[in-house]
Image: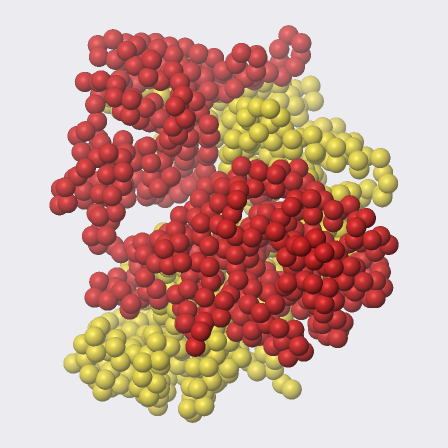
Chain colours: A red, B yellow
Amino acid sequence: MTPDRLFLYDTTLRDGQQTQGVQFSTPEKVRIAEALDALGLDYIEGGWPGANPTDSAFFETAPNTRATMTAFGMTKRAGRSAENDEVLAGVLNAGTGAVCLVGKSHVFHVETALGISLAENLDNLSKSFAHLAAQGREALYDAEHFFDGYRADPGYALDCLRAALDAGARWVVLCDTNGGTLPDEIRRVTEAVIAAGIPGDRLGIHTHNDTETAVAGSLAAVEAGARQIQGTLNGLGERCGNANLTTLIPTLLLKEPYASRYETGVTPEALEGLTRISRMLDDILNRVPHRQAPYVGASAFAHKAGLHASAILKDPTTYEHVDPATVGNARIVPMSNQAGQSNLRRRLAEAGLDVASGDPALPRILDEIKAREDQGYSYDTAQASFELLARRILGRMQRFFEVKRYKVTVERRKNKYDRMVSLSEAVVVVKIGDQKMLSVSESMDETGSDRGPVNALAKALAKDLGPYQSYIDDIRLVDFKVRITQGGTEAVTRVIIDSEDGQGRRWSTVGVSANIVDASFEALLDAVMWKLVRDGAVGS
Amino acid sequence: MTPDRLFLYDTTLRDGQQTQGVQFSTPEKVRIAEALDALGLDYIEGGWPGANPTDSAFFETAPNTRATMTAFGMTKRAGRSAENDEVLAGVLNAGTGAVCLVGKSHVFHVETALGISLAENLDNLSKSFAHLAAQGREALYDAEHFFDGYRADPGYALDCLRAALDAGARWVVLCDTNGGTLPDEIRRVTEAVIAAGIPGDRLGIHTHNDTETAVAGSLAAVEAGARQIQGTLNGLGERCGNANLTTLIPTLLLKEPYASRYETGVTPEALEGLTRISRMLDDILNRVPHRQAPYVGASAFAHKAGLHASAILKDPTTYEHVDPATVGNARIVPMSNQAGQSNLRRRLAEAGLDVASGDPALPRILDEIKAREDQGYSYDTAQASFELLARRILGRMQRFFEVKRYKVTVERRKNKYDRMVSLSEAVVVVKIGDQKMLSVSESMDETGSDRGPVNALAKALAKDLGPYQSYIDDIRLVDFKVRITQGGTEAVTRVIIDSEDGQGRRWSTVGVSANIVDASFEALLDAVMWKLVRDGAVGS
């Protein structure tokens, strides 16, 4: 039997942006689109051009993707032609290969929310999709509230789908907009839609996770015959999120009956990048990755129960439904670090540190990383701090200078014009060889604005490092992320600093402390040390 | 039609404790058991007595519950009698009304993992359950790896169930131990088990969330005829967690076809406590609550999209599948660039601020929010800061106190034992009426650990607020998030603080500055002001 082709449609950049607290910048959207394309998605919905400046800017700078770039919008309004609807024109102006328009399919929403007649809504659908087709665009219809609409008036809901298809839409997508439809009903309605003559290979499913069944609902629709799935990475989306593609993709590729029944654009090789893409998105959003996320979570293959752990050593299939390597994740089993050592050697080699297999330093490094990660450090992200830690344990770290002490003062008070102003001052005392250097800096920048205590500390640290000064003059702090995280039994602050130098190199360092200034200083110090190592400064 | 009784079995205290990083103390177990009992669970699995000191101690001090307290263990080992199995004796010694024993049902696990014959395993099951029945205990059999076992050898898997039932077990529970079975297969196998003569009202389901379908799998088993569901609060559990009772309970009570087909021990009144119980568990674990959790998450009823927000004003059912009050949660219509005036009025009304449509303050508030969001503020997340901002513009904000100045010092140096230590000190000067109050605090906590400058500032600010002191004593900082973001043309620091009070209320505030201490202080100050407003403190 030839497997059926399933099409994967990502809406992380549009519906995902409806998540509370999520706002992507244009460069972030570009990075995510490139990752989605590398993963093998069929459609990337980039946003609603014209609705906000970021989305419009994204389509102007959108990368060339193998995936079909898709602009989102809504069907034309009543009382004007499709050609004269400026909202629709804004969507078309983005010049994407595909356009997805949301439109009503529920009598209540047509009459109450829009306040137009049922016939007018059908006309809006026909005219909008005919307009898209006339422009040569691949057209998709997101049928809003479809399942509620079908429950209220199945005939009218089907008429809406037919209006779009007859006018030239490639796909009609059944949307469970408020997330309340359970998988069993999604299956029955999808079957009924197909039985009513809508072909399954022109039918998509779009679910939300308000009952924690968005993934199961998508699978139920596929089993009923739908051939497009819409979802988001990490299940981002309004309220409880959309169907999680980070779960659906491995399920479709690795699990039966799906693996042999269907094929997608995602290759097994690309699937191995899934965990990394999931973490990248969390990094962009400055979110702590969800440890228990299926397939990609740090705990997804962690075996804590003693009974399980010993069985896993005999045969991993006893407590694992798939091999963690297939999604780029790793098994965590207490007392077993065989896999850990080969991973570690590979990471060390990437940092230019060749270490022989069986070197006794390897388990020492692993143990130290584990102990520090328990304290809140995160060496996945802070690769420069990882390299420095490994160098110290391997005895391959030179001694450049030592920080003896520092002191920072932050003061906020009224100035002589009776305005509240802040000023920070930092003193750092460093010893280089036998020489002690005291440096002081304040937080005021060239424009007279206060840049805060971490800035004052960074300036004081970098003010006079004697023979090393020339190496560090071009370091620039480009990002600074702070999280409260768990360190042992206490909450601690983790600071991650991204630095850049004059050659455009970027590196990340980490510091952890209950004290945010301490944590920042630790990350700053690592940033300086890494630059000295990389540029071949000579220490003692 | 009389609804069928469904039985809810909670294993938060046993399987939930297999979550990476989770370890309950005995008093914590007691608190959770009391909350589960108040919610109306039928069974509370308290742990494995004899397996670890905490679990044994829990059963000694377990509260008197209406729910049946249940001890967990495993079936007797081969080569000894049930009476002489000291592990089983340890379980029985807990003296609980019910005992749940895990046992094999999969030929591969019997022969490979246990290394005994298929007949010996059946004998272990019979003898173990006969022993429990003879002692007058209600007995449950957790049939480990049942679905994989049924796939491998359905006859043997069924024989295991029959052995337990025939020996006197009240329930046999189909466990999808490695979480790999999808809902459709769970439904088919459960139907087959019932067709083979195992009564549905003696059948339970126990799923794991490795494919994000644990809830859907449990519902599928119920539809097939099973009458007991095992799960955990907040979906705690090994790897990706167990079936989430925090989602399943409201779905069973509020959603069709379940609400009219089944009844449980949970009343509508108890259901209103669900959000609070979920947050309490996160508090005990010192975890940041999952904002997007179905029903109980802070974002579960948050409407960000402009189109949705305006429809919600006309009729909440347009974008809400259940009323948030039924689970003790609340609707949030966040402010953001996408919001309009109707959205704003709704949000103001929820904060107790009725503003007439067309009030000229509405565009002023929107403009101010937009200007501040351009500076880096994020009112979408920080609802409490939004409310304070609106109150100021509306002239409905009382004057409580004024911060005249503050000063913080962070020092890191060697102590007398030659170890690097840090200490922060903060002075805050506040004016209340005509009275000036100077407060000083340091960052050391009760254990002698440094908690950093923001902690010192928070303590100094909250140390003496005169007539307002009693209102703020129960404020606790639960999360602290920092981002570098764009403020106009410059990078600034945005701090979001989540606070909680003794009644379990949570609120978020925001501060923005190039100076991280300033930004934190601004968010802290808003947190205090909001509490004073909400609790009706009288200012001037």
Image quarter of residue A272: bottom left
Locate the C terminus of chain B and report the quarter of the image it occupies.
top right
Q: Please state the horizontal and vertical placement of residue A285, each as a whole percent of the image.
A: 51, 42
Residue A68 in the figure: left or right of residue B229: right
Q: Please state the horizontal and vertical placement of residue A153, each as a whole percent of the image.
A: 75, 73
Q: Residue at x 57, y 82 (%)?
A: B4
Image: A222 above or below A525: below
Locate the N terminus of chain B and report the quarter of the image it occupies.
bottom right
Note whether residue B266 is visible. no
Image: A280 above or below A431: below
Q: How many marks?
A: 0
Image quarter of residue A50: top right
Q: Residue at x 48, y 76 (%)?
A: B184
Q: Residue at x 59, y 62 (%)?
A: A207
Q: Please state the horizontal and vertical placement of residue A367, each as a whole percent of the image.
A: 23, 43
Image: A77 above or below B535: below
Image: B468 above or below A398: below
Closer to the camera, A540 or B5? A540
Image quarter of residue B27: bottom left
Note whether residue B174 is visible. yes
Residue B496 in the figure: left or right of residue A174: left
Q: Residue at x 59, y 78 (%)?
A: B262
Closer to the camera, A174 or B291? A174
Q: Please state the horizontal and vertical placement of residue A395, each as a whole percent of the image.
A: 17, 30
Closer to the camera, B47 or B254? B254
